[in-house]
């Protein structure tokens, strides 16, 4: 039997406050235009679109003490955390429409709190070209979208690490990263010291996406709350040009589809971020359309009846 999904709540967070390029703020609308809600409804899922959260405009200032826009990033993440927490409390499946990847701080902090209160096991699958494990001392840019995983694991400013009250929001063993191919110099040591579970592109090249996903999904069962944080720059830029930070050598269409379908087979998707879609870099919204296509697979669409 396919997973029976609770009502899905779409939450738009139209901001590029943590990014190094402008334009991810247009991501939520591009996903709506690409038919995200309709695609899920065609799968028999109830969808409510909560519209967009609001927050401070992007002042486009240089970093202060290693962070750009820390006050504004915090405000946006508080709004995301509150919205995601409310949906989880109502028994809904929140889908965050970013916005840049710094917003995963708010959503995963909410998800982690929800799981802690209910004694549920949490696993985060982090699809990304980047490890997003920078800190103020090693970041080359100060852009907080390169820091959310570090902040979630307790490395970062108190405003962000203690967003949900306690720190860390999660421990590194809760998170598995897939598709990584760009790690900054100082970040390499940090991710190793933290013991982060990273399936980088070399690993995927060597053993294939199927075995990679089998390993990444190990121990995940129907009692697990699975959070998928999907950074669109995970995909190869040949098929997904609509992102601010394209890194060549990502998964192709079939590999990405397989990853999504293998997650669907586990029937434990509990929450989702779709982030870093940047329509300013896209070509006729094709990256948004591709993303919707992949989300359909994540929600159980398959070519044949498989069980
Ligand atoms: Mn990212």
Image (cartoon, rainbow, N blue to C red):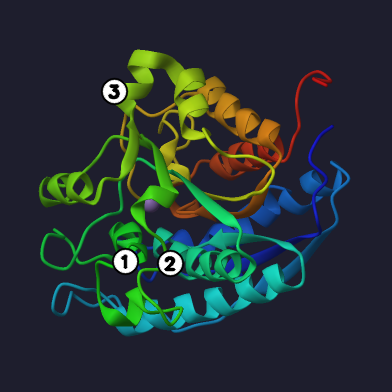
Relative to 257, does residue 78 appear above or below in the rendering?
below
- Do the residues under discs 2 and 3 have CB atoms within 8 angstroms? no
Viewer-side residue, 180 vs 172: 172
Q: Is mark 3 within 8 Å of ligand 1?
A: no
**Few, some or many residues within 10 Å of mark 2 (<14, 14–19, 20+):** many
Image spot of residue 116 (x, y percent): 55, 67
In the drawing, does residue 66 fall left or right of residue 200?
left
Q: Quadrant of the C terminus?
A: top right
Of residue 214 and residue 279, the one placed in the foreground of this image is 214
Secondary structure beneath label 3: helix
Cβ–Cβ below 8 Å for labels 1 and 3?
Answer: no
Residue 151 numbered tag: 1
- Please report whichever mark, 1 or 3, sits nearer to the chain's N-terminal start: 1
**Percent x, y of residue 265:** 69, 31
Residue 243 location in percent, x, y? 42, 47
* Sequence-wise first label, 2 or 3: 2
Graded by Cα atoms within 10 Å as few (under 14), some (14 to 19) or many (20 or more), the crowding at tag 1 reads many
Q: Is residue 229 visible?
A: no
Q: CA distance from mark 1 to mark 2?
A: 7 Å
- Which residue is drawn at the image coordinates 33% and 85% (left, top)? 71
Residue 28 located left or right of residue 124: right
Give the Cα distance between marks 2 and 3: 27 Å
Say if mark 1 contacts mark 2, CB within 8 Å.
yes
Task: Please give the residue where the numbered disc 2 appears in the rendered image.
Answer: 105
Q: Mark 3 = which residue? A: 202
Where is 234 relative to 124, above or below? Answer: above
Q: Residues within 10 Å of mark 3 (few under 14, many from 20)?
A: few
The tag earlier along the polypeptide, 1 or 2, is 2
In the image, which disc is placed on residue 212?
none
């Amino acid at each position: 039997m396919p997973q029976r999904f609770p009502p899905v709540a779409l939450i738009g967070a139209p901001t590029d406050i943590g990014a190094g390029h402008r334009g991810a703020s247009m991501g939520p609308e591009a996903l709506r235009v690409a038919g995200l809600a309709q695609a899920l409804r065609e799968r028999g899922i109830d969808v409510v679109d909560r519209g967009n959260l609001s927050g401070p405009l992007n002042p486009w200032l240089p970093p202060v003490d290693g962070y750009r826009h820390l006050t504004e990033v915090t405000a946006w993440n508080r709004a995301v955390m509150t919205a995601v927490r409310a949906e989880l409390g109502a028994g809904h499946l929140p889908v965050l429409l970013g916005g840049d990847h710094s917003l995963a701080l708010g959503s995963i902090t909410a998800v982690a709190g929800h799981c802690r209160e209910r004694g549920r096991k949490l696993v985060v699958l982090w699809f990304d070209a980047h490890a997003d494990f920078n800190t103020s001392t090693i970041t080359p840019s100060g852009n907080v979208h390169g820091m959310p995983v570090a902040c979630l694991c307790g490395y970062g400013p108190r405003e962000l690490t203690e967003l949900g009250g306690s720190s860390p929001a999660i421990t590194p063993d809760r998170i598995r990263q897939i598709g990584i191919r760009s790690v900054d110099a100082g970040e390499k040591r940090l991710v190793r010291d933290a013991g982060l579970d990273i399936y980088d592109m070399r690993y995927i090249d060597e053993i294939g996406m199927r075995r990679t996903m089998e390993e990444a999904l190990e121990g995940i069962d129907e009692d697990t709350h699975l959070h998928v944080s999907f950074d669109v720059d995970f995909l190869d830029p040949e098929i997904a040009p609509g992102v601010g930070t394209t890194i060549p050598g990502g998964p192709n269409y079939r590999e990405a589809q397989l990853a999504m379908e293998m997650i669907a087979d586990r029937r434990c998707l509990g929450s989702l971020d779709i982030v870093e879609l940047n329509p300013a870099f896209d070509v006729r919204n094709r990256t948004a359309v591709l993303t919707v296509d992949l989300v359909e697979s994540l929600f159980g669409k398959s070519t044949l009846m498989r069980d």
